[in-house]
Amino acid sequence: MDKALQTMVNNMPEKTGKSLEAWKVILKKKAFAKHSEGVKYLKTEFGVTHGFANTIVTLSKEEEQAPVDLVETQYTGKESLKPIYNTLIQFVNGLGNDVTITPKKSSVSVIRKRQFILIKPATKTRIDLGFKLKDKPITERLENSGPFGTMCTHRVRLTDESQVDQELKKWITEAYEKSI
């Protein structure tokens, strides 16, 4: 924290009637979609000046933005799918040291030079595994991309770890090899 900001935080109890920690507790009880809503709330409900309100909201948000395990969040309430995910990740990590696993909010991209598969817990009982397999015919199991749209060319629906079989591993390997 720079010196000016630290001075502001030190003066907060005298100038606003509460410490930064006390303000954080108050803001934690409210959920504001926008920064400006939190500032307005402190100004109108507590008479806090704009500068202090802005600082309080900013410092409160920094604390909230602790790193989140995106994969754990994706599988909360879908824990039965986690063994399928773990088996897929174990397999793709064995393809080569040029594989990058990139968790996002609702899916995990598996990338070589470009994404070759996408792992998405689609429902509480199913993972949708998207592939980039250009010119590969669609089969009963290797369906069209469905909800993935243009991000993927194909999709396989997985409901059990046993479905990560030799056929599926062959398609994953093919997508990996084509992603250079």
Image (tube, rainbow, N blue to C red):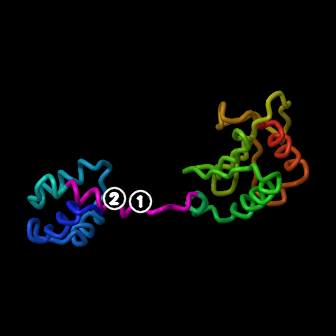
Q: Is residue 128 left or right of residue 133?
A: left
Q: Position of residue 147 (x, y in %)?
A: 64, 37
Residue identifier under label 2: 61
Residue 23 drawn above or below residue 58: below
Q: Which quadrant holds residue 43? A: bottom left
Apparent side of residue 165 relative to residue 105 in the rendered image (left or right): right
CB atoms of marks 2 and 1 within 8 Å: yes
* Closer to us: 46 or 51: 51
Choose top left, top right, bottom left or bottom right for residue 13. bottom left
In percent of width and height, residue 80 lies at 69, 64
Q: Position of residue 91 (x, y in %)?
A: 81, 56
Whether residue 158 sits left or right of residue 139 in the image: it is: left
Q: Identify the residue position indicated by label 1 in the image.
A: 65
What secondary structure is marked by label 1? loop
Which structural element holds mark 2? helix
Range shown magenta: 54-70
Whether 121 is among the magenta residues is: no
Q: Residue furthest top?
A: 135
Q: Does the magenta stretch mainly form a helix, a strand or a loop? A: helix
Residue at x-position 73% and y-position 44%: 112
Q: Amino acid at mark 1?
A: Gln
The quadrant of the picture occupied by the N terminus is bottom left
User: Residue placed at 54% from the left, 51% from the top?
Assistant: 105
The residue carrying pointer 1 sits among few (fewer than 14), some (14 to 19) or many (20 or more) residues within 10 Å by Cα, namely: few
Q: Measure how far apart labels 2 and 1 are at the Cα level.
A: 6 Å
Residue 65 sits inside the magenta stretch: yes
Hey, what amino acid is under mark 2? Lys
